[in-house]
Amino acid sequence: QVDLVASGGGLVQAGDSLRLSCATSGRTFSRNAMGWFRQAPGKERAFVAVISWSGDSTTYADSVKGRFTISRDNAKNTVYLQMNNLKPEDTAVYYCARVVATTPFGSWGQGTQVTVSS
């Protein structure tokens, strides 16, 4: 069974919205801060957003502030990324991960492709 399965990606136009989900089978989900990262073609994986274990604290990359919102449901072992006003530069494979601060640890799991056309 694969841990950390991201879903919800797709092909959209600039200005559209998508909501990504990342489900985990891990029993420690509610004790871990979680983060979203993305990897665009030819680029290294980059930080997008993180949320504390309780959901009370969030941090965003400057490039997505005001457009993306990270949230979590500990009862469902799921973390979400609401993405509004998408831009072509948001095109990437999106992954979730357990984090310490903004540093991921453990396995990456399955990502989800987001493609934004202009």
Image (cartoon, rainbow, N blue to C red):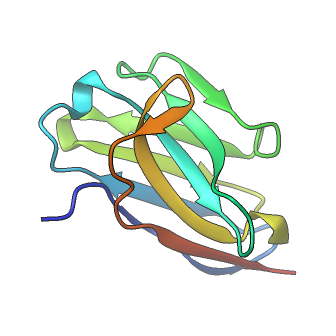
Q: How many marks?
A: 0
Residue 14, quarter of the rendered image: bottom right
Establish if 10 lies above or below 34.
Answer: below
Q: Nearer the viewer, residue 66 or 41?
A: 41
Q: Quadrant of the C terminus?
A: bottom right
Residue 80 in sight in this render: yes
Residue 108, quarter of the rendered image: bottom left
Establish if 100 lies above or below 41.
Answer: above
Residue 18, quarter of the rendered image: bottom right
- At horizontal 57% and vertical 25% (from top left) the residue drawn is 58
- At horizontal 49% and vertical 29% (from top left) the residue drawn is 51
Q: Residue furthest right?
A: 118
Residue 87 in sight in this render: no
Q: Is residue 53 left or right of residue 95?
A: left
- At horizontal 42% and vertical 23% (from top left) the residue drawn is 55
Q: Nearer the viewer, residue 101 or 12?
A: 101
x%, y% of residue 89? Answer: 82, 66
Q: Quadrant of the N terminus?
A: bottom left
Q: Is residue 63 left or right of residue 34?
A: right
x%, y% of residue 81? Answer: 53, 49
Q: Is residue 73 left or right of residue 88?
A: left
- At horizontal 53% and vertical 22% (from top left) the residue drawn is 101
Q: Is residue 92 left or right of residue 6?
A: right
x%, y% of residue 93? Answer: 57, 69
x%, y% of residue 7? Answer: 40, 67
Establish if 54 lies above or below 38.
Answer: above
